[in-house]
Amino acid sequence: MSEHKSSTNGAYPVLALKGVVVLPAMTIALGVGRPKSVRALEAALEADRQILLVAQRDEQVDDPKPDELHEVGVLARIVNVGKQPDGVLQVMVEGIVRARLLEYAQLDPYLVIRPILVEDPEDKPVELEALMRGVSTQFERFARLSRSVAPEAFMTVMGTESPGRFADLVAQHVQLKVEERQQVLGLDVKTRLELLSQILGKEINILDLERKIQNRVRKSLEKSQREYYLKEQIKAIQQELGEKDDRTAEVDEYSKKIKDAGLPENVKEKALDEVARLEKMPPMVAEAVVVRTYLDWILALPWTKGTDDRLDIAEARRILEGEHYGLKKAKDRILEYLAVRKLSPESKGPILCFVGPPGVGKTSLGKSIAKSMGRKFVRVSLGGVRDEAEIRGHRRTYVGALPGRIIQGMKTAGARNPVFMLDEIDKLGMDFRGDPSSALLEALDPEQNNAFSDHYLDLPFDLRDVMFVCTANMLDTIPSALRDRLEVIRFAGYTEEEKQHIARQFLVPKQRRENGLEAHGLQIADEALRKISREYTREAGVRNLEREIGTICRKVATRVASDEKNVPKRITAPMIAKMLGPVRFRYGMAGKEDEVGVSTGLVWTEMGGDIVTVEAALVKGSGKVALTGQLGEVMKESAQAAVSYVRSRSKRFQIEEEWFSKFDVHIHVPAGAVPKDGPSAGITMATALASVLTNRPVRKDVAMTGEITLRGRVLPIGGLKEKVLAAHRSELRTVIIPKENEKDLREIPENVRRRLRFRIAEHMDEVIEEALLPALPRPSAPEALTPLPVIEMPTIEVPLDVPQPRPSSPPQA
């Protein structure tokens, strides 16, 4: 193996470079550690100290092949060589001239290449002169902005006259990627200067932007430092003058309010901790606003403030009786609570739940309770609430967080012992955000609500002295765990006499006052009120009755305001139709005559009691049973039980057995658009079916309610008071009820009991005996339907050129 001693034959040892490109006139220190590179360096040192520096295409290759080196390198002179402690040689080299690789003279033990040396021309055409001036101007601005070019190096670059050398010196001081520097190495002078002009323009733009950003940041910092310095000076001056700045004054004000508020010890400690946090915060940060809001809520809540209960039971009774008619059970419960509070001041507040149809005075009674006890009243509507956070509040980590409805209500009340009404508690919903009814369990449990926890406050709040009053139309939709904590007081509908009394004592004066008829002195006669109640409203409460009275008052007010003469001051029954229009409801019994297969039942809804008609019919068939009228599953099963009972008693009813195989039974409950369910119509359906099978008419003045079993037993039902009141409103004479509901008759008003005859039934046979009349003659063939009369319609000729109206769409059910 021959060694390269000199470069007389034009071949030079090759030093492959990783991640670096050396340009002519560039001095740089290189670390040499690879065996081939060390041998090439030693060969160059033994010869004329000249070596060919070529960059690798891939930096990851340790032993590059000829095709893994770039085609253009630089011939360099070795200035000196040193050795580092780790054994790597430190070589200082200086680039001399570009070298384009021509051929490889040797591959091992190191690379030797015979290059073509490329000298840059020294002449400067006009175009090169212009390029040099442009690049010179750009480089001068670049050096001024970057401040990375030493003054000596800048002077060297600016004093260079050779275009090629000038371009190489400029490229050395610009931050270029390896690929860009290799590109500069391989280009001619003109193209090299054009590329440098583009690169310098880009670098200048970046440096300009950096400078603007730095100036902006520096100004902002200088402003903040200046403001801080001035604030400290102001603080020092204020201290000298005995004054305080806004922040200190705010902190001191909060601290004073907290100490004077008489807060519980744990609440006071928490509030003072928040004040300490506020004092350390910069004034404009968002967290400071959150802390201020939190402190305001703590200070606004009635932790210890309360009102003194009025324990005069006679006065409380007078207020309750003066504002509400009837409702004896609810009033008695309030007076009992006052009596207990008088004897035992430490007793816990009750959790009452008023359940009844709309318009019977549940919400207004809550206000009267607060007035009679001398307490504050606050009402929160829970209808449609689906988010647990509505009850317990949001945690303070959320933007715009607030306490829940209960804590907000306590703030509104301003006392720790208000009458707190949770209206429409049966309308609570539930979705993915939680179950609000579960959040109410803690607040409505007397054993737990002494430390009610709101997510926003994160402090226990004592609700023991709060008198919670809930209202609902029905109990079925209230979860059992919540229902177990409530003391339920049922509100039945009003009788006709009670409605007249309420209208005369409360509703008419209220509407007269609201419609400006005090001076006119409008009166509504009792028979007119009775007519409105019977024929223009059908409700358990008095809300629609008040609405109709308001309509009459507005019509009279219109005539008074129009200066009409002979405006009536007393409204009588004959005048009602003119003011309210045609009769809306038929008052009286459900049926006009005794009919076969039609019976009257009593039902209960959230609107109160009502009557319902059950129809039964036989049609030729194979013994099938059809049930229509949008019946629920329970009611369908009750109908099946009624059919089975009647079939099992066919001999007693003298019904031929083959009837059940030759005829289909159809049971229908009118008002098909209204869903119906429940077992209490069982005896009603059995009566209608027995009537149609025995051809015995059902008495039109008899209504009934009760569940039926297969053996014919009549089981108890609920809502008896509401159902009896519905029978009374419909002017029925006899009501059949289960034996086990006999005890509930004491809740029926005395005047209603006197006007109705109650038949107590233990078995279905007793119901049949009471409700059915003697059998009619059975027709041998079904009666033909009476044909409708034919009405002759006049023929109207329409001209062809007149557009005919389009037929209207059929009414939607």
Image (tube, rainbow, N blue to C red):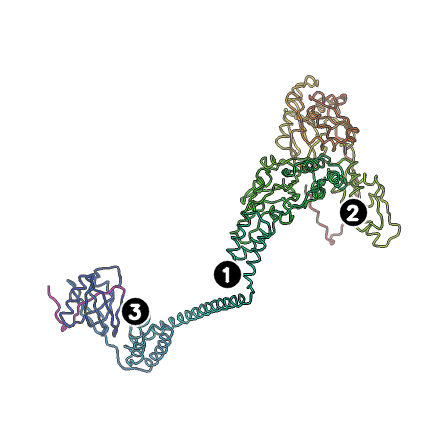
Q: Residue at x 22, y 61 (%)?
A: 64
| Contact check, label 1 and label 2, Cβ < 8 Å | no
Q: Which mark is residue 181?
A: 3
x then y, percent, for residue 314: 75, 38
In this rendering, does residue 672 appear at all?
A: no
x then y, percent, for residue 250: 56, 59
Residue 18 colored magenta? yes
Most common SS among magenta residues? loop
Nearer the camera: disc 2 or disc 3 = 2
Q: Quadrant of the N terminus?
A: bottom left
x then y, percent, for residue 570: 86, 45
User: Is 732 rendered above or below residue 20?
Assistant: above
Q: Which mark is residue 282?
A: 1
Magenta residues, start to end: 1-19
Answer left or right for 680 relative to 555.
left
| Contact check, label 2 and label 3, Cβ < 8 Å | no
Which SS class for mark 3? Answer: helix
When asked about the image quadrant of residue 501, the answer is: top right
- Front-most of 131 and 557? 557
User: Is 755 rendered above or below residue 92?
Assistant: above
Nearer the camera: disc 1 or disc 2 = 1
When asked about the image quadrant of residue 450, the answer is: top right
Q: Name which residue type carries label 2.
A: Gln
Which SS class for mark 2? Answer: helix
Q: Name which residue type carries label 3.
A: Arg
In this rendering, does residue 362 appear at all?
A: yes
| Contact check, label 1 and label 3, Cβ < 8 Å | no
Which of the marked residues, 1 or 2, is nearer the chain's N terminus?
A: 1
- Front-most of 482 and 693? 482
Label 1 – label 3 distance at C-alpha: 50 Å
List the residue tagged with mark 2.
511
